[in-house]
Image (spheres, grey):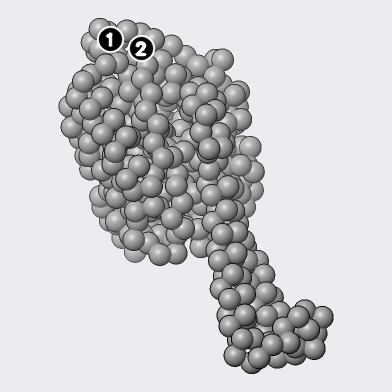
């Protein structure tokens, strides 16, 4: 909505300038036209020259404004020891970056990339530096490479992995929000979009996050904007344009505001940062924005910290969005806290209520359905049968007001609602 308003105002300004030039040409007796008492042919040449300058000025002002707005965001990619995944992740960023994208309505703005390596793996360093010093700059994309050695380079066993990850996050966010841009022509970012080396991004990933900047800036009840739906498996999701608020911090491709980082950095845990952030979010009453269809896809089957068999199985079934949504042309005002609550609860209450999963699965083939759960054990049993996440870490995954939703047959919504 913000960008649509800006482009409208710019169009009005351009039209005024154009009409002014036409007036000068048609009525040379005007105050400005008196300076154009020359031959008709020369007058036309002067007019065309001024008209060209008008369009150049308009384009420059547009680009200045968008660069100024988008310079408050940067992409931070954390990497460690898996060069094969890093190569794929950076290639996806290159392909979908606004500078290289084939999308015509989205301005080709340089959103900087920050690659933060934990440790000293030589192959990871080679891939990162090749992209940062050669590939990205050759396309007009700014890139910064940093390394974290605060825990040395010899504690990559599984027992120490979570400690390293938490430490690396703090190091990377501190540098990205402060010291990294001190000598750069770019402004220090007010928002950082965080990725990891084993995440691929969707084609509309950049526009999705850019469109959410005004909301994250203005809505202080938001902890983050995420690209991820934990229950977004193929066959359980449908609407690529649908966004929701959630009480559960999703992670896996998420945008954080500087003010939030300033609030939490001194409390940042030494281990299990994501679970800590989820409990912190619920304690403070924060929420996140998430899409129905994920804008990231997890490929890190080998060598990562999240290596349990069931987790791998769940992650590989997530659907990566393949439809380009013009987010900057989309009205996102419905995501405001009170408006979202009112609209969402109305949809839930309008759904047909059922008390058993068997009956609900029959009804949801033809209309939205509401299934009641009576306890944590009851929900776990329902979730197990539907093959969605059943764990509760402060809140159920994807939940809004303890309501979890999915599309069991890919069309109508099943709301799983507490009694």
**36 over 198 or under it: above or below:** below
In which quadrant will I find the N terminus?
bottom right
**29 over 105 or under it: above or below:** below
Q: Residue at x 23, y 10 (%)?
A: 157
Give me the C-alpha separation between circle 1 and circle 2.
7 Å
In this picture, residue 23 sits left or right of residue 106: right
Q: Residue at x 23, y 19 (%)?
A: 121
Across and down, in percent, residue 7 comes to 59, 64
Q: How many marks?
A: 2
Across and down, in percent, residue 198 comes to 26, 33
Comparing 369 with 195, the one in front is 195
**400 over 339 or under it: above or below:** above
Q: Can residue 7 be seen in this snapshot? A: no
Across and down, in percent, residue 359 comes to 32, 52
Comparing 348 with 395, the one in front is 395
Q: Can residue 305 be seen in this snapshot? A: yes
Report which quarter residue 216 is drawn in. top right
Q: Residue at x 34, y 61 (%)?
A: 102
Q: Which residue is mark 2?
A: 149
Question: Dots 1 and 2: beta carbons under 8 Å?
Answer: yes
Near mark 2 (Cα within 10 A), the count class, few <14, some 14-19 or many ≥20, is few
Outermost right residue: 31
Q: Give SS at disc 1.
A: loop
Comparing 241 with 53, the one in front is 53
Across and down, in percent, residue 256 comes to 51, 34
Q: Residue at x 46, y 58 (%)?
A: 107
Q: Give SS at disc 2.
A: loop
Residue 218's label in the rendered image is none
Q: Which residue is mark 1?
A: 153
Comparing 124 with 377, the one in front is 124
Report which quarter residue 106 is drawn in. bottom left
């Amino acid at each position: 909505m913000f960008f649509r308003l800006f482009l409208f105002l710019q169009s009005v300004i351009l039209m005024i300038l154009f009409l002014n030039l036409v007036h000068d040409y048609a009525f040379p007796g005007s105050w400005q036209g008196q300076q154009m008492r020359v031959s008709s042919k020369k007058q036309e040449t002067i007019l065309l020259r001024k008209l060209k300058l008008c369009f150049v000025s308009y384009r420059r002002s547009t680009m200045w404004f968008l660069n100024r707005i988008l310079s408050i965001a940067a992409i931070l990619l954390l990497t460690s020891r898996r060069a094969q995944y890093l190569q794929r992740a950076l290639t996806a960023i290159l392909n979908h970056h606004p500078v290289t994208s084939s999308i015509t309505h989205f301005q080709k703005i340089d959103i900087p990339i920050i690659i933060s390596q934990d440790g000293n793996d030589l192959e990871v360093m080679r891939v990162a530096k090749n992209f940062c010093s050669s590939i990205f700059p050759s396309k007009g994309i700014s890139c910064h490479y940093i390394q974290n050695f605060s825990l040395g380079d010899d504690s990559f066993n599984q027992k120490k992995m979570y400690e390293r990850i938490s430490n690396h996050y703090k190091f990377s966010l501190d540098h990205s929000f402060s010291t990294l841009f001190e000598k750069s022509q770019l402004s220090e970012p007010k928002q950082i979009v965080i990725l990891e080396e084993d995440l691929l991004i969707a084609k509309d990933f950049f526009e999705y996050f850019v469109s959410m900047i005004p909301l994250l800036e203005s809505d202080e009840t938001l902890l983050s904007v995420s690209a991820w739906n934990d229950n977004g498996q193929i066959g359980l999701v449908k609407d690529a344009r649908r966004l929701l608020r959630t009480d559960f911090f999703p992670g896996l491709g998420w945008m954080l505001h500087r003010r939030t980082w300033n609030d939490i950095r001194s409390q940042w845990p030494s281990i299990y940062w994501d679970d800590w952030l989820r409990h912190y979010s619920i304690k403070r009453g924060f929420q996140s924005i998430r899409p129905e269809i994920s804008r990231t896809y997890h490929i890190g089957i080998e060598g990562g910290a999240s290596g349990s068999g069931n987790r791998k199985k769940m992650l590989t079934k997530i659907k990566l969005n393949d439809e380009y949504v013009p987010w900057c042309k989309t009205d996102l005002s419905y995501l405001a806290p009170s408006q979202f609550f009112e609209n969402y609860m109305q949809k839930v209450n309008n759904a047909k209520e059922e008390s058993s999963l068997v009956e609900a699965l029959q009804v949801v083939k033809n209309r939205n359905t509401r299934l009641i759960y009576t306890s944590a054990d009851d929900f776990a049993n329902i979730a197990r049968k539907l093959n969605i996440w059943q764990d509760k870490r402060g809140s159920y995954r994807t939940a809004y007001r303890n309501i979890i939703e999915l599309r069991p047959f890919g069309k109508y919504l099943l709301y799983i609602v507490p009694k």
